[in-house]
Image: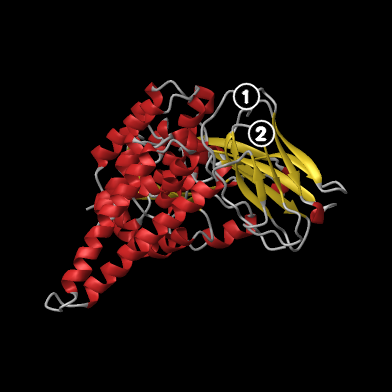
Amino acid sequence: MKYIISILLTGFIVSQPAAQEIQLNFPHFAGKAYDFIIFQGDKQETIIQDTIPADGKFTLKIPEEYAPYTGMSRWLITGTLEGGGLDMVIPGKNFSVECLEAQPTEENIIYSGNNEVNLLNALYREEHGILAKADAMNIALQSFSKTDKNYKVFEQEYHDQLKTYRDFQAKLKKNASYAARFLNIVNFTMGIGTEILDTEEKTAKNIADYMVQELDWETLYTSGHWTDVIGGWVSSYTMVLKDNYAFASDFAKIEKKLKDPKLFKSFADITAHNLTLQGRDDLIGMISPIVISSNKINESEYEGALLSYMTGAAGTKAPDLLLLEHIGNVEDHNHKSNVLESKDFASGDYNKTLLIFYESGCGPCENLLQQLPGNYDNMKSKGVKVMAVSADTDENVFKDKAKDFPWENTFCDYQGKTGINFKNYGVAGTPTIFLIDKSGKIEARMSSLQEVLEKLK
């Protein structure tokens, strides 16, 4: 069976009893195991694992803690080479779906009580037609000179399609269905905004404005695109718009919109993860007060990427390093520990410390570790001491890599990125580089050698 994906979307959340059920009838798949999954932000929650009975009729029940659930779901055939299943929306109420054929298609999968299938298909076809015509006219405008007799015709048609797309978006805005809300979310993952614009910067700003002003965040949370859309929003500011103050301002506006602490915590976590991977400690520092003062994240929940809001920021005291010396085999977990205080990192003739968090085999890390030795003597002459902390979990891999480093101090506890030093510094991605002054205060948090060299000029 081919993997059939039917994106089926429905409208309003209506008042329902706690029990929420989907009746399925797929007689040709009797005896096959399946998973039933719903989307919660960056997580896929498998809420049912079972086997289709002999008559092909069975019921999927939404657990009470999620009911009434409105959002995307995935019914997935497992344990077979053929696979198969359905991506479908749960409309906040009961409905049924059946297919009496051995080869499911969009035409022979029948839904009852889920009336927005035709709406979504119609909206998609309408939008696709507009965008295809606009693209064709834009290509024509690029291909013909302005003196060509047909140029004015292409130009007029192109502007007509821009207006048609604006009208289409106005219609979507008035439509309260899940389909209408979901369609723009999918568009954003492909870099398509609510207007057809002529530059990447304008499109990025258009999408960013929509996310602050109009996006339904509950719909995004259950769409299956939560992580991609938030990650794209971060990248649009760091790589395209490059406006730090607008980013912080938009972050604050979104924080106000996300009343549910669960949604805000996930939003802040994904934002921090993306900023950490890009070495944008400056932006983490700008939004940290917003995150902390929101009181939507409990103190005990600041871990992983979220910890970067509390630790490892420029201007704060660098955490001490906990150094573990293993006795015998690493697997035996016998070790003694020693604490190296951050105020003692740069001793003697050194006035600064470059502390590098890396992982062997990580592409950007390998690039950094190949370039750094060539700049090591220059750094040393400027009074900069280099130390490194590895995320390696294999002792042989760590030692094979570290033996060629020109600096003396490289540490590893073989706990990967869950190790205590990674946690204390709020490091979720590698490489992450800290420039620390003689007193133990963090001056900068970076992710590339180029940034380091700029700081040390």
Give the CA separation, mark 2 to mark 1: 9 Å
Of the pair 435 and 439, the residue shown nearer to us: 435
Of the pair 104 and 448, the residue shown nearer to us: 104
Question: Can residue 22 be seen?
Answer: yes
Kindly give the residue lying farthest to the right in the view shown.
54
Q: Quadrant of the N terminus?
A: bottom right
Question: Can residue 408 be seen?
Answer: no
Is residue 298 positioned above or below 196 on the image?
above
Inspect the image, locate mark 2, and give the three-letter code of the amino acid beneath it: Asn
Look at mark 2 in the image and give the residue it sits on. 94
Residue 440: x and y, percent?
36, 35
How many residues crowd mark 2 within 10 Å: few (<14), some (14–19), many (20+)?
some
Residue for point 42% across, 30% down: 310
In the structure shown, which secondary structural element does the residue marked by tag 1 occupy?
Answer: loop
For residue 100, what is the image quadrant?
bottom right
Of the pair 188 and 303, the residue shown nearer to us: 188
Residue 35: x and y, percent?
73, 46
Residue for point 24% across, 77% down: 143
Are the residues flagged by discs 2 and 1 in contact, CB closer than 8 Å?
yes
Return the disc, 2 or 1, that comes first in the chain's sequence. Answer: 1
In the structure shown, which secondary structural element does the residue marked by tag 2 occupy?
Answer: loop
- Colour scheme shown: secondary structure
Left or right: where does residue 207 sit relative to residue 72? left
Left or right: where does residue 224 sit relative to residue 328? left
Look at mark 1 in the image and give the residue it sits on. 16
Inspect the image, locate mark 1, and give the three-letter code of the amino acid beneath it: Gln
